[in-house]
Image (spheres, grey):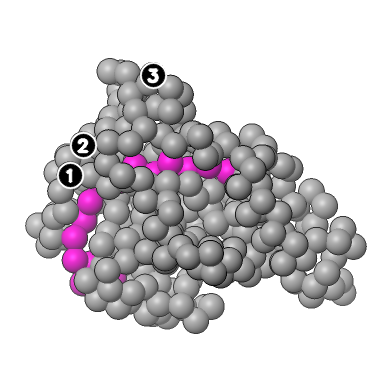
Amino acid sequence: GGPPAGAAPASGWDVESVATELLACEAERRDRPPFTDEWPGLDLDTGYAVRDRTLARRLERGERLVGVKLGLTSRAKQQRMGVDTPFVAWLTDAMVLPVGDAVPRHRLIHPRVEPEIVFVMGERLEGPGVSAASAMAAVASVWAGAEVIDSRYRDFRFTAGDVAADNASSGAFVTGPVGLPPAGLDLSLEGVLVEVDGEVVDSATGAAIQGHPGEALALAANDLARRGHAIEPGWVVLTGGMTDAVDAPPGVSVGLHFTHLGSVWLRGG
Ligand code: OOG
Ligand code: MG
């Protein structure tokens, strides 16, 4: 029973109107309640359909696709956000934050900062059937990263479908000082300290990301394959927040210190 996923629901929302509303919220820096309050049928796959519509609109207005990000790959993030499904979203050049820039609050709603292990791809990676080992073989270099997440949902309240539609709370991201070849690193043991104004407020290792960030990369390739996408050479892949995100208001300084990948500094904004 019930209408098929993606069909116009009784609430009046559909894939197209949700995509339009999310892009408008982003442009106007306006948050809103999650769509699933009115449209419970907005499940993960319908959310992905919305995500792909908003990407198409971003590309139409001249943005360039530069990679993908994973969301909710660590238990710290899953527990904090109340959603335990990892998922994949798009990164465009408009989300790249130049090194040295502060958190771009002027174009965001309620930004928060989280530490991530980032891959730059050397080879194409296409699912299904990708393992962590075959995924890592396609990686050219590994970087420290700071993701500035931002949600179009008030108080970051959402279900898996809502947040997939919202491109996994994408905002901006910046990468660290060095790109290292993956072969010499044990990424499950790569540690990070999250420092806010001189105080270490959180820490984690790469094992927080599905046991190893390569597992998250494999998950991304296999998940994207369900909708006919592959991960392309040169793409950036954000493997997911290792700890809960932190607030970075103006005047605050956030340092993300990795064992081998160096430090990423971000001024609040
Ligand atoms: C969802 C975005 C998740 C991550 O790394 O887990 C994400 C959110 O926390 O709003 O970027
Ligand atoms: Mg993230």
Please say whether residue 142 is one of the residues in the magenta stretch: yes
Secondary structure beneath label 2: strand
Residue 256 left/right relative to 216: left
Q: Tell me which amino acid carries mark 1.
A: Pro
- The amino acid sitting under disc 3 is Gly
Residue at the spot of label 3:
251
Of the numbered discs 1 and 3, the one sitting upstream in the chain is: 1
Residue corresponding to mark 2: 263
Quarter residue 140 falls in? bottom left
Q: Is residue 47 visible?
A: no
Which image quarter holds the N terminus? bottom right
- The magenta-colored residue range is 133-151
Q: Is mark 2 within 8 Å of ligand 2?
A: no
The residue closer to the viewer here, 108 or 136, is 108
Evaluate if marks 1 and 3 touch, with contact meaning CB atoms under 8 Å apart: no
Badge 1 is on which residue?
177
